[in-house]
Image (cartoon, rainbow, N blue to C red):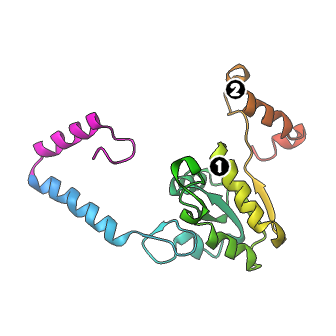
Amino acid sequence: MAQLPGIGKRTALRLVLHLLKQPKEQTGFLTQALTTMREEVKFCVSCHNISDMAVCEICTNAKRNHQIICVVEDIRDVMAIENTGQFRGIYHVLGGKISPIDGVGPSQLNINTLVEKAKSGAVGEIIFALSSTMEGDTTNFYIYKQIQDCGIITSTIARGISVGDELEYADEVTLGRSILQRVPFENFFKNN
């Protein structure tokens, strides 16, 4: 259990000891649930999101704008953006970001299928929604270089000061980007 993300040795030990105290039926239920999950949950062949079918509900939804693709690192990012209720396009899950230090290059990510979609002519805009880290920016730039001649609008999500944060606690890069990417005041309240 300590190999699971976010679970250290002590937490793993507590979980194992807790499970050992439970009735066999309860641990059997957990075992069956994990087995069912592995057998029935798949990755969407189009966007690489999780799904119980070959193509996920987002990709098959005719009400969504299939010409706008939001590129994210992870399935959790899809969930976070969906929870906002603000995005009506579709997604493309990369499965990580380029990180030479961690041995992750472009070939280990779902980049080729995104580039194929971009070159197909069916995409009008790609929104980069990766972490604002060196690896995230590197991944964004790598993909941008692959698709820059496709005639597609490329954008990135806004970066800046979180609502409720004090300016004095913002790091210099975030504060600087917020100043450079400022919006006209009359537009500020239009979508808020």
Viewer-side residue, 103 vs 161: 103
Amino acid at pointer 2: Ala
Secondary structure of the residue carrying tag 1 is helix
Q: Which residues are magenta?
A: 1-23
Relative to 113, say whether 134 is above or below. Answer: above
**For residue 167, side relative to residue 83 (left or right):** right
Residue at image coords 28%, 67%: 36
Q: Which amino acid type corresponds to the residue marked 1 in the rendered image?
A: Gly
Q: Is residue 51 left or right of residue 87?
A: left
Magenta stretch encompasses residue 13: yes
Residue identifier under label 2: 170
In this figure, what is the number of numbered marks?
A: 2
Q: Looking at the picture, how far across and down is residue 142, in whole percent?
A: 71, 59
Residue of label 1? 136
Residue drawn at (17%, 45%) of the image: 19
Foreground of the two, 25 or 134: 134
